[in-house]
Amino acid sequence: MLDILFPRECVGCWKTGSYLCSNCKKTLYAHPEICPFCHKASIHFQTCCSCKKEGYNAIEGIIVGFAYQELIKKLILKLKFYHKYDVTDFLAQRLALAIQTTAGINKNDPIIVSFIPSHRRRHYLEKGYNQSELLAKSLAKELNLPILTIAKKTRYTTSQVKLNKQERQKNLKQVFILLDLQKIPTNATLLLIDDILTTGSTLLTLANKIKETRPDIKIWGAVIARNMK
């Protein structure tokens, strides 16, 4: 009934049927493989050796599904602010493909999917959901992998959108509490899912916190798109 009353429309050409029609899908392009922190070319999106020496060694790399162009931006906004939950299926399918074709992740190791948590105020009162959690659940189903909530956000923080790198790091200080890390097998790979990557501060902050307790875990980030602002 909802599909009849409010049919899905392509965010690119407004054709009814889906949020992105087959022709507009062809205009999407992959993000180049770069280091998540210095943005230099890096095979399989791995954190480069120079950045690891600078202290960015908690994350093996951050896989980016798409360049942050207009159509992807519109899809993410529909998910993030307009309660279009079914957008997650398409986005998760494409992100799953990027993960499967990334040789940097050892597919022989146990792999656990998790996500960046949101504060309960934003989750339950402001939005009613966490888009990163929805993506992670859809991705875990697509890849047939277990999913685990490994942290909660204990403090309500200012939106990261308009903050610079230093402000983002300050905003995230002492904000995560870890949960159930003992459920992750030894030497497993943990996939932390988020929607958009800008500076990587959020993923890095949580990864550093995890490494304090479980240095054996290999941590990878995976996001739909990267905003290079």
Image (cartoon, rainbow, N blue to C red):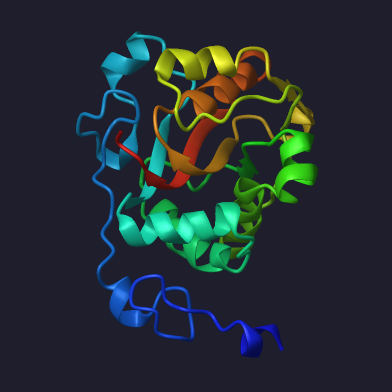
Q: Nearer the viewer, residue 50 or 159?
A: 159
Q: Residue at x 36, y 55 (%)?
A: 101
Q: Residue at x 69, y 35 (%)?
A: 185
Extreme residue in the left direction: 41
Q: Nearer the viewer, residue 126 or 19?
A: 126
Vertical placement of residue 165 versus 115, above or below: above
Residue 85 relative to residue 69: left or right: right
Residue 206 relative to residue 11: left or right: right
The quadrant of the image that shows the N terminus is bottom right
The percent position of residue 68, horizontal first and vertical second, equals: 33, 49
Q: Is residue 96 visible?
A: no
Q: Residue at x 68, y 36 (%)?
A: 117
The quadrant of the image that shows the C terminus is top left
Q: Nearer the viewer, residue 207 or 79?
A: 79
Q: Nearer the viewer, residue 108 or 130?
A: 130
Vertical placement of residue 97 versus 53, above or below: below
Q: Is residue 168 visible?
A: yes
The percent position of residue 192, horizontal first and vertical second, equals: 56, 38
Vertical placement of residue 165 versus 5, above or below: above
The percent position of residue 56, horizontal first and vertical second, equals: 41, 17
Vertical placement of residue 127 versus 82, above or below: above
Residue 94 relative to residue 135: left or right: left
Name the quadrant containing residue 157.
Answer: top right
Name the quadrant containing residue 196.
Answer: top left
The percent position of residue 143, horizontal first and vertical second, equals: 56, 60
